[in-house]
Amino acid sequence: MGNVSIHNIKKSYGKVEVLHGIDIDIADGEFVVIVGPSGCGKSTLLRMVAGLEAITSGEISIDDRIVNEVEPKDRNIAMVFQNYALYPHMSVFDNMAYGLKLQKIAKAEIRARVEEVAKTLQLGEFLKRKPRQLSGGQRQRVAMGRAIVREPSVFLFDEPLSNLDAKLRVQMRLEIKKLQRRLGVTSLYVTHDQIEAMTMADRLIVLNDGIAEQIGTPMELYDEPASQFVGGFIGSPSMNFIAVELKNETIHIGNTTIPCPDHLLYTGPAILGVRPENFKLPDSGFREMNLNIDVVEKLGADTLVHGKISGCVEDIVVKLPGNVEIENQSALRIAVDLSKLLLFDPGTGRRVGRN
Amino acid sequence: MIENRPMVTVFSHVVLILGVLLVAFPIWITFVAASHDAIRVTQVPLPLWPGDQFFINLKATLMKGGNGAAGRPIGLMLMNSLVMAMMISVGKIAVSLLSAFAIVYFRFPFRMGFFWMIFITLMLPVEVRILPTYEVVAQLGMLDTYWGLSIPLIASATATFMFRQTFLTVPDELLEAARIDGAGPMRFFFDILLPMSRTNIAALFVILFIYGWNQYLWPLLITTDQSMYTVVMGIKEMLEDAEQTPAWHIIMMTSLLAMLPPVMVVIFMQNLFVKGLTDTEK
């Protein structure tokens, strides 16, 4: 129960194809996050699973049943919308009960189910209020509650936290995650926020321009991005990319040369990907290079140094511990963790040189 | 904005009070005239203060009516006016709600064509199409009936257009949420769209009721049976009794009575009316 299988799904609006064939099998109880920049087709994909958007070609099945032609209400799904889409003229109770009423469930049972869900979401005292009398976070919870009372086999979330302020977002994202764990309901969650994606997902789909760039667990995507896009999208501050040249088992970065680590097997020009935290202050075991400093940001726990490696044009970010003493200096000696270097093809952006 | 210019305040109050007097004075004269007997009303100068005949006149107007051919009790005319105004406003609202619903939420061939066809009828009020409309109503045998009084006035582009705008402001997600909840189109219409538009409906009802109540030319044209006269045309009829002097006190009383229902509608629906025109919360 509750598994979703998306097979070679395509979507076109007229002649414009926005999704170019997405494939993923989602197991029962899994929390899958679809992440990507705006306009990449992630909401479209979710809405196709919901049945709100027609499928151009391909197959979607929910609970092992092909649902391409099934009405949204018969797909056994529940959806939480970005703006919550609560019925403004109905009380919280009626909002949550509306779907059940239409299913012709007995009044007493509706009452029991709604009240139970309201209790778990701490909405008990608000049941008689109208949505406009609630705060953003409470509305969000009502929207969640409306989805939960239906006891669906799949939850669909369309950027449900993007209308909340930063603090509440962090709190709600934890709550949603906990709730999903407890209910064990398969969930498909769309967001453009990579932190949300990383923290909540069992598995991530990174969408870019209608193509699934990579599907995998958050740490797989973080450590082994399949493309420059995924590397740059996942992680904050994002990965640094530097154009380099590989020759004779050395990497030429600007006017510095470092030995090529064993896991990289490549010659010719490439894009080097280094995460900001894989830079260190010089220490044994690392090769040093010169960083011309532009700006230093002190965040307390960390220090972010923005600058350029001498001989390079790319702006990079280096993440150092918070207690580093950087006085009014214009340059810094830094070293890079050779074992964490990644290479990408300068043309296609795909990972290359994996040994 | 904080302003502290006493002259401006005084000046604007003077202007406003003058405006109120200008509007209220004819109504006051009507009221005064309705409270005197027939002889005093026709004497110069006109009385400026109410007399003691108000209730006597009221009774005479309701029971007996004016002089001559049109001398009929006003009660029936008020009733006719009420039925006509209600049929027009309820009919207009029902038709416009449904047509706006169709235009906004359904995809059918020539959708925009139909919308523009409806919209163009704004340029064809009753006065412009009065001859063909009369012909059609006559052919349908609806002369001297409530249907004949109201149906030609029911089709309304204004109301359709207004509801279209209202529906367009309803977020699409609400429709989608309703679809996932299992509501079909008509369920969505009755459970969600209708309650959400209720202030607009109320505002429109006020406007349309007054529009219907004030209809003059159309009822004048299609009613020949006196039992179908409306009060607005009734007043005019009273003035045209060839042989007798017009019974001004009765006419004025009738005018007062004719003014009453629209005023009541406005007073009782004022809150909703203002909300409907200004509310943006959805």
Image: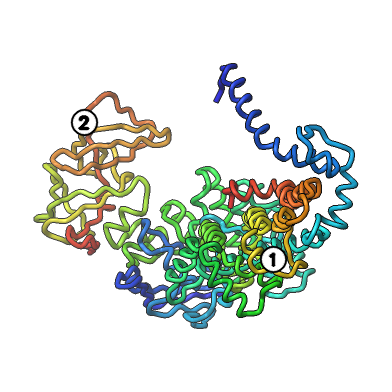
Residue extending farthest to the left is A248
Q: Residue A313 versus residue A140: which sits nearer the camera?
A: A140
Q: How many marks?
A: 2
Say the numbered circle drawn on residue B87: 1
Which residue type does callout 2 highlight? Ala
The answer to whether B9 is drawn above or below residue A351 in the figure is above
Q: Residue sitting at 19 percent across and 54 percent down?
A: A271
Q: Residue at x 61, y 52 (%)?
A: A139
* Nearer-the-camera pick, A145 or A127: A127
In the image, A93 versus A270, the foreground residue is A93
Which amino acid, mark 1?
Met
* The C terminus of chain A, quarter of image: bottom left
Residue B198 visible (yes or no): no
Residue A233 quadrant: bottom left
Label 2 is found on which chain of the structure?
A
**Residue A179: percent from left, percent from top:** 60, 59
Q: Residue A181: which quarter of the image?
A: bottom right
The residue shown at (35%, 45%) is: A237
Numbered badge on residue A331: 2
